[in-house]
Image (cartoon, rainbow, N blue to C red):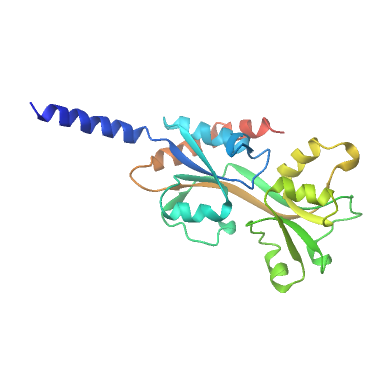
Amino acid sequence: MRLLPLIVLALSAHVTAEERPLRFSVTESWAMPMIRIENGQATGGILYDLQHRLAQKVGRRAELQVMPRMRVQQIMVRGEIDVRCYVNPAFLQESHYQYIWSVPFMNQRDVLVSRSQPPQDLHPEQLPGHAIGTVLGFTYPRLEPLFARGDLRRDDARTQHLVLDKLLAHRYDYAVSNDKSLEWYNRHQPPGQRLYESSELGNDLMSCIVRNEPDVPTMQLLRAMVRMKEDGEFDEILSRYR
């Protein structure tokens, strides 16, 4: 008879483990429409909707952990993040052998931004000696060789929104932004203070990576991403923020 309480306890522990929230990393330097962060908590945006929907698909709750980008790799190595979204292999300088890539869920264009409309496409190679507004910790494959040679100088800000604020305030003449953040920023500016795309710096497919361990429904999550793409759910989420 004494075995019965032990069996009940074991079953209870098993159910509790299955119901553990899925842990998603959220980088505090992201800006709307990708994510809204208020008082250190993610409260809305494309990735907020995507990650909650993905967790719902596999019967879990989503736990969005907001952290500096520099900490994400450390947390992932320790197995404390289950899913990292909004990433492309070209952006990573470290190995993620314990994670599996999902299908892409969106396309992102990185663009050079200025305060005035250029007469023609203006490329970073034409701006020797200039400071370029960038996000702290972000990697820009097109610009990295120019930074390394000293042809351009990084001027980092903590978030994408602050990068554009500094450009508007004449702290530098050019900055880098993804196209969706630039469109969102301009939506909230009066006509005379809108910023302009000068040229395209990159065009990348963005995916998620999922930790491949027994305590994570890895294959279910990856299949859910495929179904969401086939059913048009990604496009539906993106359309809410256009």
Image coords of residue 94 (percent x, y): 51, 61
Question: In this image, 220 relative to 166: left or right?
Answer: left
Residue furthest bottom as drawn: 149
Image: 183 above or below 135: above
For the question of whether residue 88 can be seen, the reply is no
Image coords of residue 102 (percent x, y): 50, 46
Q: Please name the residue shown 21% across and 31% down the image.
A: 9
Q: Please name the residue shown 9% across and 29% down the image.
A: 2
For the question of whether residue 176 can be seen, the reply is yes
Quadrant of image for the C terminus: top right
Residue furthest front as drawn: 39
Question: In this image, 157 relative to 9: left or right?
Answer: right
Q: Quadrant of residue 154?
A: bottom right
Image: 109 above or below 49: below
Image coords of residue 199 (percent x, y): 80, 54
Question: In this image, 98 relative to 126: left or right?
Answer: left
Instruction: From the viewer's side, name the closer residue of 233 and 2.
Output: 2
Quadrant of image for the N terminus: top left
Q: Quadrant of residue 42?
A: top right
